[in-house]
Amino acid sequence: MSRDQKFFDMYFLVIGGLVIFALVIFVLAMAISDRTQGVFTRESAEYRAVVEERIKPVGDVYLPGEEQLAAAPTVTTLPEPEPVAAAMTGEQVYNAACNVCHGAGVGGAPITGDVDQWTARIAQGIDTLNDHAINGFDGDAPTPMLAKGGRADLSDQEVIDAVAYMVEQSQ
């Protein structure tokens, strides 16, 4: 016998053994599957109920002349609305938002209470000051005035009250 023939014989013997081993594993898996899954899932009432629920029709079809029973009316209660927070006073808004820059003059902001810094601004008019405070202002200061001092949650009236407070403190 030649060496090639011995190699092919051994090769086919090993491959044949592996194929037989794989078939035995497959047959055993099928037998175990039929004994466990078939009995405990497909045949159980719970499994059938779940399948029936999943495949039941979404709605009903009524032909002309047939009547549909009306569903019982349902009563829904609406949740109580949350109470609206009371508007802050000018001093509260100043302490919460404006004091950060206007308390120490950060970024060129006029310091509250410094009459010299506020005189020219007050001369422009309260409407101009309110507009700059509400909409922001990019003047000659190194840092621009942010709209509403960077606090978008403040109402326009709260900002106007804060400006009036700062003007009152700076006259």
Image (spheres, rainbow, N blue to C red):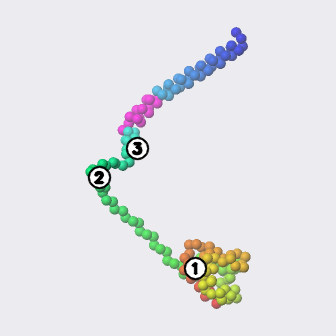
Of labels 1 and 2, earlier in sequence is: 2
Q: Position of residue 14 (x, y in %)?
A: 62, 19
Q: Which residue is mark 3?
A: 54
State the residue at coordinates (59%, 22%): 18
**Residue 4 placement, left or right of 95:** right
**Residue 43 placement, left or right of 3:** left
State the residue at coordinates (62%, 83%): 129
Of labels 2 and 3, earlier in sequence is: 3
- In space, the residues marked 1 and 3 are separated at their CA atoms by 58 Å
Q: Quadrant of residue 130?
A: bottom right
Three-letter residue code for mark 1: Val
The magenta span reads 32-46
Q: Which residue is mark 1?
A: 159
State the residue at coordinates (39%, 43%): 55
Q: Above or below — where is 39 with respect to 56?
A: above
- In space, the residues marked 1 and 2 are separated at their CA atoms by 59 Å
Q: Residues within 10 Å of mark 1 (few under 14, many from 20)?
A: many
Three-letter residue code for mark 2: Gln
Q: Confirm or deny contact between disc 1 and disc 3 (CB under 8 A).
A: no
Q: Residues within 10 Å of mark 3 (few under 14, many from 20)?
A: few
Three-letter residue code for mark 3: Arg
Of labels 1 and 3, earlier in sequence is: 3
Q: Above or below — where is 4 with respect to 101?
A: above
Q: Residue furthest top?
A: 1
The quadrant of the picture occupied by the N terminus is top right
The nearer-to-camera label among 2 and 3 is 2
Q: Residues within 10 Å of mark 2 (few under 14, many from 20)?
A: few
Q: Confirm or deny contact between disc 1 and disc 2 (CB under 8 A).
A: no
Q: Which residue is mark 2?
A: 68
